Amino acid sequence: MMEEMIWRGLGVSGGRSAGKTWYLEEYEAEVQEENPKNSSVDEEIERLQQAIILTEQNLTQLEAKVKAERGEALAQIFGAHKLLLSDPAFIGEALLRLQKGHLSAEQALQEVAGEAIRMLRSLDDPYFQERAVDVQDVLVQLLQNLRGSQGNSSDLFPETGNYVILADELTPAQTIALPKERVLGFVVRKGGKTSHAAILARTYGIPALVGVAEGWEELKNQSWVEIDGEAGWVRQTPEGHTLSANMEGMEEETSLASGLLGELILAANVGSPDDLAFVKKFKAQGVGLYRTEFLFMGDTLPTEEEQVQAYQQVISSCAPDLTVIRTLDIGGDKRAPALQLPQEKNPFLGVRALRLTLRRPELFRQQLRAIWRAAAAGPTAIMFPMIATLEELFQAKEILNLSREEVVQAGYPVGELEVGMMIEIPSAAWMANKFASEVDFFSIGTNDLTQYMLAVDRENNELAELYQPYHPAVLGMIARVSQAGLQAGVWTGVCGEAGGDALLAPFFAAVGIKELSMAPGSLPKVRHALASLDLKLDEKISLVDSVLACATASEVKEVLGKVTPIA
Amino acid sequence: MIARELTINNKSGLHARPASLWVQAASRFQSKVRIKRGEAIVDGKSILGILSLGLSSGSVIELLVEGDDEAEAALSLEELMHDLENQDR
């Protein structure tokens, strides 16, 4: 067996994908000899001015394109780049140096940009440091225009096939120029969560991780990799293994609520307000899982106001549909430098999610206050992750009530909240009937439930075959939870990866699940599978019976395959 | 010439977006705009210049405006800072 190679970084855009890699080399302009063409000062100034005009035109086009496709906020990146083009300290300085003679336009630009990049990188605040990429981006475009070539990265990108892109650094223009429908993922050596590459990847729904510094030299030579943009890892994968997060490219054809479609709410999983474009595009009926971790994974923690704003944006955009906010689920494999979490021997069995927030009441109350305040913007539900015992639920609910009072006392309007819990630990799943009287809803996290039921680390490549969401024990547990909920008048949703699995959707409908929440890109597939299928009550019962009568995951797959023919 | 002391009170300081807005606002006027912080003086119409000061929340700067429309320019930039501050609320 090959020794497993895994690299870690900051997951900045969720989703899992795998495929052949394509390495985007860092742009290195050839160092020019001192004005080799011996052109006159005026000629060089003229060349530079031409390049500026062309670059400005490119940027204006990019700005308009991005604004039309992705909205104002992202387009501002390119607006800021245009400001650099008229910046006296950048272009003005380059022109001054040209006037002194002996320099080519390229040299003058490189000198000035190099100084600016070094200056920005030397600043303390990471946010300012990352603006060096903007200078780099403008420099590259100017140099390309000086050379008269349109050599942007999309020209170099292979003409066919889908790829995971490995890059030292990704500039906004490079990212925009790539054919996104053929990009499986981004793995970037530099950058943090506020880097443009991170924001763009999220907007396009492409899995991405950044800041993968350790072991980069080996990583960049890998030809096949699998990545997880939520957990923040990349690892070797066998040749030929391709997996797409499938966010774009699948067109809607299903029209009305037909078949089983009318019985289920199909919602989206999101990680930040940037994902809202996809919620709309794929016509999700609300958000079934809003992962709030992302706000907390930077170098500093968000303020209450920042949280209120982010939550409000998602809630008001989904209204009148429901937004389900999951409280901070950090720890385990998710890094959060600002929280200074201690190393643990078994992080997945350690202080993660609710276990962490119950130990950091200040942090927890601040998030809960923000959620109460944001809930005034539209229908909102809150759920607690990683509950194993009833006592934990009681504690969480008590703090939830306390924080509500704090908000009232501070004089802010308070919204209404449905209160629910994640079902992902077997003990809670087994006892769902006891929990049911304490909550408004359950949301089953199938990834963790599978991992904990089969005792398989889902990130361990070696054990990939044992990680079986189709295992009859897992599906039997899900049926049990849903039943317990129905008896108590509590609705149940599924928000793990299985929620976006078209093969499983009819089974979920049959056991009485009310909501499936998934990566937005999975919605068309699942919708299509449900719309083309109509099961009567007795057919549902027999489907559930035959699934639960299976002895192995592969038998289950066979049974499900007969119900839903998947292309 | 007009000289005003300003405190950067918006939460994120003069980061990329606020700095862009500042440059756009300053560039609408004929007057020369400079920002002084400690020993450093930068061109207030240069985004790189402003970023180089690394102005985070709480930084105190001196705004120096000189020219025919200096009064309007100073007022407009002060208003911008207020707007940025209010957007945080």
Image (spheres, rainbow, N blue to C red):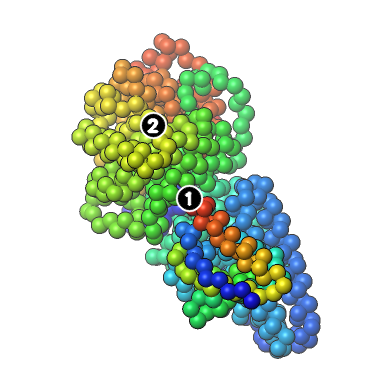
Residue count near mark 1 (Cα–Cα under 10 Å), binned few <14, some 14–19, many ≥20: few
Above/below status of B3 relative to A79: below
The x, y position of residue A231, in whole percent, is 39, 50
Chain ID, mark 2: A
Residue type highlighted by circle 1 = Arg
Q: Which residue shows up at 52% across the image and 52% down it?
A: B87
| Residue A246 seen in this snapshot | no
User: Marks 1 and 2: same chain?
Assistant: no
Distance in Å between CA atoms under marks 1 and 2 = 23 Å
Q: Which residue is mark 1?
A: B89
Q: Depth check: give the residue in front, A153 or A313.
A: A313
Q: Which residue shows up at 31% across the image and 56% down it?
A: A339
Quadrant of residue B42 within the rendered picture: bottom right
The x, y position of residue A35, in whole percent, is 71, 86
Q: Nearer the viewer, mark 1 or mark 2?
A: 1
* Quarter of the image with the C terminus of chain A in it: top right
The x, y position of residue A563, in whole percent, is 47, 21
Residue type highlighted by circle 2 = Leu
Classify mark 1: helix, strand or loop: loop
Is A42 left, or right, of B47 in this rendering? right
Q: Which mark is residue A306?
A: none
Q: Which residue shows up at 39% across the image and 65% down it?
A: A214
Residue count near mark 2 (Cα–Cα under 10 Å), binned few <14, some 14–19, many ≥20: some
Quadrant of residue A408 within the rendered picture: top left
The x, y position of residue A302, in whole percent, is 40, 53
Q: Which residue shows up at 76% across the image and 73% down it?
A: A49
Q: Which residue is mark 2?
A: A417
